[in-house]
Image (spheres, coloured by chain):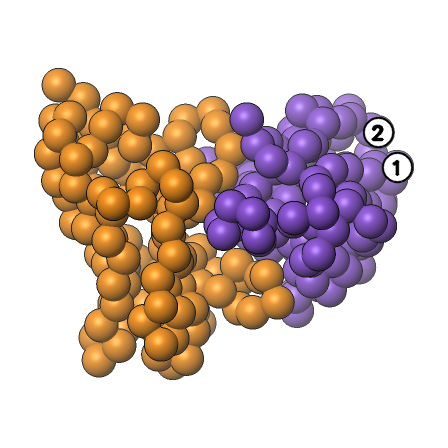
Chain colours: A orange, B purple
């Protein structure tokens, strides 16, 4: 069974930093592109960043230059380093597996990030 | 403001069929494929349709997808109360170089 478990969320002040982690199991992690998708309360899904199997990275315009996505295949782990956090970054962050052909086929349970003073 | 436009809400009676539209442009749906996700209250999204009309294993054939030009459509037949959820379309936008989702459609089964 595919499992994605996020950790590292919490309350942080504006301008602060957080590092999200996602541990994957039930599949060969290194064979898949991975993404972070967030969702503010009552809002739509918002793609944040993606990383390919060759460590190629992609970012939404709203986080480029502030967030860094990375992966450690030996530990089946995905990371999101978030710096210069803003109130608008407050959301539940999901770790997502890319099944190919545009299919985000497995989602973690989500981890809440709150940016507030 | 989402690049992909969905109706905020749709409703139908149990057993009926409903369709949800997703309108995009030549830089996203027009040149790519559409996926559809179901988000039940308090849970993570789940893929229902990918590559315009493909269903992952375990997704019943009550759910169908299609694409025409710059729009995609999700169809749900034989509606059940358990289908009440938010539905999102998604695709890659080549102008934004980003994955983009629609604003979501809330389905109510009356």
Image quadrant in which you'd find residue B21: top right
Residue wearing tag 1: B16
Q: Chain of mark 2?
A: B
- In the displayed structure, does residue A36 sit left or right of residue B107? left
- In the displayed structure, does residue B38 sit left or right of residue A44? right
Mark 2 to mark 1: distance in Å? 6 Å
Q: Nearer the viewer, residue B33 or A6?
A: B33
Residue A29 image offset from top left, x and y in percent:
36, 76
Q: Nearer the viewer, residue A3 or A95?
A: A95
Q: Give the label on residue A37, or none.
A: none
Count how many numbered circles sit on residues in the image.
Answer: 2
Q: Residue at x 55, y 26 (%)?
A: B1
Residues at circles 2 and 1 in contact by the CB criterion of under 8 Å: yes
Q: Residue at x 26, y 68 (%)?
A: A71
> Up-down: is A93 above or below A12?
below
Quadrant containing the N terminus of chain A is bottom left
Circle 2 SS class: loop
Residue wearing tag 2: B13
Let me know if residue B67 appears in the view: yes
């Amino acid at each position: 069974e595919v499992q994605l478990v996020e950790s590292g969320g919490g309350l942080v002040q504006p301008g602060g930093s957080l590092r999200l982690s996602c541990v994957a199991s039930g599949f060969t992690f290194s064979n898949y592109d991975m993404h972070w998708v967030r969702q503010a309360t009552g809002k739509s899904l918002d793609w944040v960043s993606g990383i390919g199997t060759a460590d190629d990275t992609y970012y939404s315009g709203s986080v480029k230059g502030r967030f860094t996505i990375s992966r450690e295949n030996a530990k089946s782990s995905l990371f999101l380093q978030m710096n210069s956090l803003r109130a608008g970054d407050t959301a539940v962050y999901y770790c997502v597996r890319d099944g190919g052909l545009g299919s985000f086929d497995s989602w973690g349970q989500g981890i809440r990030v709150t940016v507030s003073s | 403001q989402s690049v992909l436009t969905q109706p905020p809400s749709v409703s139908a009676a149990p057993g009926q069929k409903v369709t949800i539209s997703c309108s995009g442009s030549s830089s996203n749906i027009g040149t790519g494929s559409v996926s559809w996700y179901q988000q039940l209250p308090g849970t993570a999204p789940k893929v229902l349709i990918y590559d315009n009309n493909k269903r992952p294993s375990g997704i019943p054939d009550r759910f169908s997808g299609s694409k025409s030009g710059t729009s995609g459509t999700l169809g749900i037949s034989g509606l059940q109360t358990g289908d009440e959820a938010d539905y999102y379309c998604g695709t890659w936008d080549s102008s934004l170089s980003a994955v983009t989702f629609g604003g979501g459609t809330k389905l109510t089964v009356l």
